Image (cartoon, grey):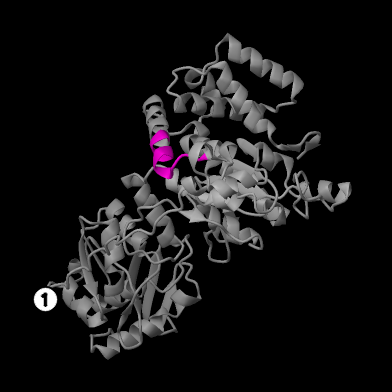
């Protein structure tokens, strides 16, 4: 985006801004002139015209204040316009000339690096964030407009950029070893982490669904350097503070009262929603049927494409949304359908209506659908130790990393990295079936009413099961187990979700 400033005697207004500015940009003239007068910078006489290019793009916010102010100062003879070459200027001005930080400063640094700028002048409070995105550029932090004028002319030395904050001591992560019983659910978590497969857990209250979901981030692989930048970029775009490159995968757990825009993103000035804030991490939806159905349906596109596309009158936005979805739900309104010790108080019609709140197409996109039963009292008393104990998160993570390495080697040179992203058109190339597994799947298609999407997802899960066991090819037990995970959508015998 470029800022052009000229004097124009043909205008009636003393200060006019064109180029689709919003209200905040239109008010920039008052802030700029007051700030220039406060630091006694020369101001040209007569009306001023400011053009924001490209003219077809709507301009929002106060981040252009500094660029407009320096353009006006250059027109008034206060600085040589050549000193602004290859320089990106960003910052909001107070009436007294103080520079205020801007939202999305990390994206500003990204833009400066991509466009080949030599230096960036920005508010002192935003310098750390800009430097994180563009460490090889010269960052000129300024606390005041007067300081910015001196910096671009080389008349003063810039203040040092505040260093990124150290990661400090990490909070201990919940460990899988704390899970009592639930070996089947732990196996599903391992699969979900190894192949990035979406997971639905259903079961009575107190069975440990939320307990299990919070342990999933602890067994996921660490973020790669590129993914750290992507996650940090999303935080910056959402207006969240950025003090260091993000090192841990996001774990987002929005309440079921969240709106459509809160989940998918949007608003008059579109911002990323929860599905984007969970990019490269985990999106956990607890009490799935309690979400509004319209809100849940927005998940269909991100689950398939890994992006959210928003179309508004002001333009179109595409946000990343490559998250691992983990959802939990009760089987009925009271929650005790299928409980071995507590009777269900719900009428059959109530159960059907409750389960119908989650649409079939959304369920079809869940690779793993498991029943989480009430915990056995013996497991509770034993504390999950001994022969009934589960893997520790550290041991599980090692298994996940080994499986991910096999996938990374297999898919080298392709745009995807995990089995959960494998396109259906490439299944025969990367996940071929021998005669035995093929016969099992053919029988499942005839007898289980498996959809085409369901078939693709079963094959993906089977490929991950083979990777976890170090097998080069998919074997019959892998297909059978993948079908079992998909078939556990039947919460009770004869009860189909």
Q: Is residue 442 above or below residue 384?
A: above
Q: Nearer the viewer, residue 320 or 68?
A: 320
- Is residue 109 depicted above or below 378 in this figure? below
Q: Residue at x 54, y 40 (%)?
A: 186
Q: Which residue is mark 1?
A: 155
Classify mark 1: helix, strand or loop.
loop
- Badge count: 1
Rendering quarter of residue 198: top right
Q: Main secondary structure of the magenta part?
A: helix
In the rendering, at what x and y percent does residue 344 appear? 81, 50
Residue 300 visible in the current orientation: no
| Residue 100 rendering spot, x and y as whole percentages | 34, 78
Q: Is residue 284 left or right of residue 331?
A: left
The image quarter in which residue 497 lies? top right
In this view, the residue in front, 209 or 133, is: 209
The extreme top residue here reads: 435
> Is 314 inside the magenta-drawn segment?
no
Asked whether, in this view, residue 373 is left or right of residue 53, the answer is: right
The span picked out in magenta is 389-399
| Residue at image point 55% right, 57% down | 253
Examine the rendered structure and indicate whether residue 495 appears above or below residue 79. Answer: above
Residue 8, given in percent of the width and then of the height, sits at 36, 78
Local packing at callout 1 (Cα closer than 10 Å; few below 14, some 14-19, many 20+) is: few
| Residue 445 visible in this rendered orientation of the protein | yes
């Amino acid at each position: 985006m470029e800022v052009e400033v000229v004097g124009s005697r043909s205008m009636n207004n003393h200060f006019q801004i064109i180029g689709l500015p919003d209200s905040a940009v239109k008010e920039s003239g008052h802030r700029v002139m007051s700030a220039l007068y406060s630091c006694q910078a020369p101001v040209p006489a007569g009306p001023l015209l400011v053009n924001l290019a490209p003219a077809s793009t709507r301009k929002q916010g106060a981040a252009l204040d500094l660029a407009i102010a320096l353009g006006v100062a250059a027109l008034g003879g206060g600085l040589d316009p050549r000193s602004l070459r290859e320089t990106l200027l960003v910052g909001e001005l107070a009436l007294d000339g103080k520079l205020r930080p801007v939202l999305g400063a990390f994206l500003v640094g990204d833009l400066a690096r991509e466009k080949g700028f030599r230096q960036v002048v920005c508010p002192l409070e935003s310098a750390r964030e800009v430097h994180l995105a563009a460490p090889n550029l010269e960052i000129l932090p300024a606390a005041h407009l007067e300081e910015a004028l001196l910096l671009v002319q080389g008349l003063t030395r810039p203040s040092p950029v505040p260093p990124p904050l150290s990661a400090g001591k990490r909070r201990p992560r919940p460990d899988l070893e704390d899970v009592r019983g639930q070996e089947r659910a732990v196996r599903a978590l391992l699969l979900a982490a190894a192949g990035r497969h979406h997971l639905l857990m259903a079961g009575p209250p107190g069975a440990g669904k939320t307990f299990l979901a919070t342990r999933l981030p602890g067994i996921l692989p660490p973020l790669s350097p590129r993914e750290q930048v992507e996650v940090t970029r999303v935080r910056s775009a959402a207006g969240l503070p950025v003090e260091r490159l993000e090192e841990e995968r996001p774990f987002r757990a929005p309440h079921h009262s969240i709106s459509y825009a809160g989940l998918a993103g949007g608003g008059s000035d579109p911002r990323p929603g929860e599905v984007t804030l969970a990019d490269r991490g985990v999106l956990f939806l607890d009490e799935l049927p309690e979400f509004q159905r319209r809100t849940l349906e927005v998940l269909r596109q991100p689950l398939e494409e890994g992006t959210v596309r928003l179309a508004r009158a002001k333009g179109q936005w595409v946000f990343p949304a490559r998250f691992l979805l983990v959802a939990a739900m009760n089987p009925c309104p009271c929650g005790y359908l299928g409980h071995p010790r507590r009777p269900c108080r719900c009428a059959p019609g109530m159960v059907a209506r409750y389960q119908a709140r989650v649409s079939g197409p959304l369920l079809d996109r869940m690779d793993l659908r498991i029943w989480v039963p009430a915990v056995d009292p013996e497991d509770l008393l034993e504390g999950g130790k001994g022969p009934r104990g589960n893997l520790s998160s550290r041991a599980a993570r090692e298994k996940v990393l080994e499986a991910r390495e096999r996938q990374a080697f297999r898919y080298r040179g392709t745009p995807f990295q995990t089995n959960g992203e494998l396109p259906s058109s490439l299944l025969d190339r990367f996940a071929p079936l021998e005669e035995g597994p093929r016969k099992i799947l053919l029988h499942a298609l005839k007898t289980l009413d498996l959809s085409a999407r369901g078939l693709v997802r079963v094959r993906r899960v089977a490929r991950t099961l083979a990777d976890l066991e170090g097998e080069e090819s998919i074997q019959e037990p892998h297909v059978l187990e993948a079908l079992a995970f998909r078939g556990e959508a039947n919460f009770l015998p004869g009860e189909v979700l």
